[in-house]
Image: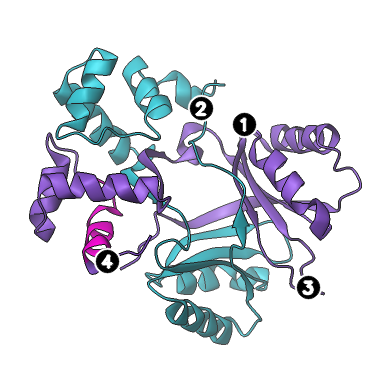
Amino acid sequence: MTPEQDTLSKLEKRLLNDYQRGLPLSATPFADIADALGATEAKVLSTLSDLQERGVISRVGPVFMPQKAGASTLAAVAVPPEELAAAAVFISAFDEVNHNYERLHRLNLWFVVTAPDQQRVDEVLAEIERHCNQPVLNLPLMKHFHIDLGFPLWC
Amino acid sequence: MVLTECDYQLISAIQGGMPLVSHPYAEVGKEIGMSEKQVIARIGEMQAQGVIKRFGVVVRHHELGYTANAMVVWDLPDERLDEAGESLGAQDCVTLCYQRPRRLPEWPYNLFCMIHGRSREKVLAQVEQMVIELGLSDIQHEVLFSGQRFKQRGARYQ
């Protein structure tokens, strides 16, 4: 257990571990969760808001299967280290870019582009390629093998 | 599943997260002119059809102390890809496992998996263990750790 996890309350841990999937599809899902965990609805709501404010969770909501709604791809580009920060700012500024990471590799900038259609994805990649003056590696998903049940935090 | 204009409105309304209120589905419905029942039914259908792969708390691993994030890429012969993909995807600490195209000569790797761990050493040890247990010692692979995180949020489709 990490220090970050040590400071979590029991209720926080249960919410984080047990509800990465299966938010109840009832009129009052948070009251249902509260019942299951022996808490009040108000406490569940305030705890989730707090986790969200602290950045421990990004949201309570859907994770979409890539390419089942809209078009997306994973892309990578090799930029000189001294230009990394500026290239990252340019790439992150696209609303279509939802993830943008440095990776410790010759291809040092990796990002995900998601848009309503393939044409827009291609346009974004082309603009980034022009701006960085480097070829962008376009690696669209072909097949997924993992059924995403969430990540077991306390194992 | 064919997504309707209505579905895209719903996706747009929920992709940033559900409102943290007592009746969240009713609240979303009010925004886009759907009833609470319709919202619940469409979200249920999108889950059943795999458009939504999970619906709940989306954890930011880094903030919980899982600071080592590695993308492990493998160059698998086509005939071994499915078997390796399924066995890697079934590992507890693998959070994503995808086939993507090779881009030769620049990029020979066709299978990608994501591992979150508490340290680089632990992640490397997990990769080592998977190589042995899953019989992948003859497969060329690379571990790409993440450095700076410049942007991280859910996808937006509208």
- At label 3, the amino acid type is Glu
Q: Nearer the viewer, mark 1 or mark 3?
A: 1
Image quadrant in which you'd find residue B5: bottom left
Give the x, y percent position of residue B55: 35, 41
Residue A154 lies in the magenta-colored region: no
Residue that mark 4 sits on: B4
Quadrant that contains the C terminus of chain A = top right
Magenta span: B6-18
Which is more N-terminal, label 3 or label 1?
A: 1
Q: Is residue A95 left or right of residue A2?
A: left
Image quadrant in which you'd find residue B111: bottom right
Distance from disc 1 to disc 3, alpha carbons, whole Å, reads 31 Å
Instruction: Identify the residue at horizontal 39%, vertical 28% (top origin).
Output: A16
Residue that mark 2 sits on: A153
Q: Nearer the viewer, mark 4 or mark 2?
A: 4
Q: Nearer the viewer, mark 3 or mark 4?
A: 4
What's the chain of the residue with tag 3? B
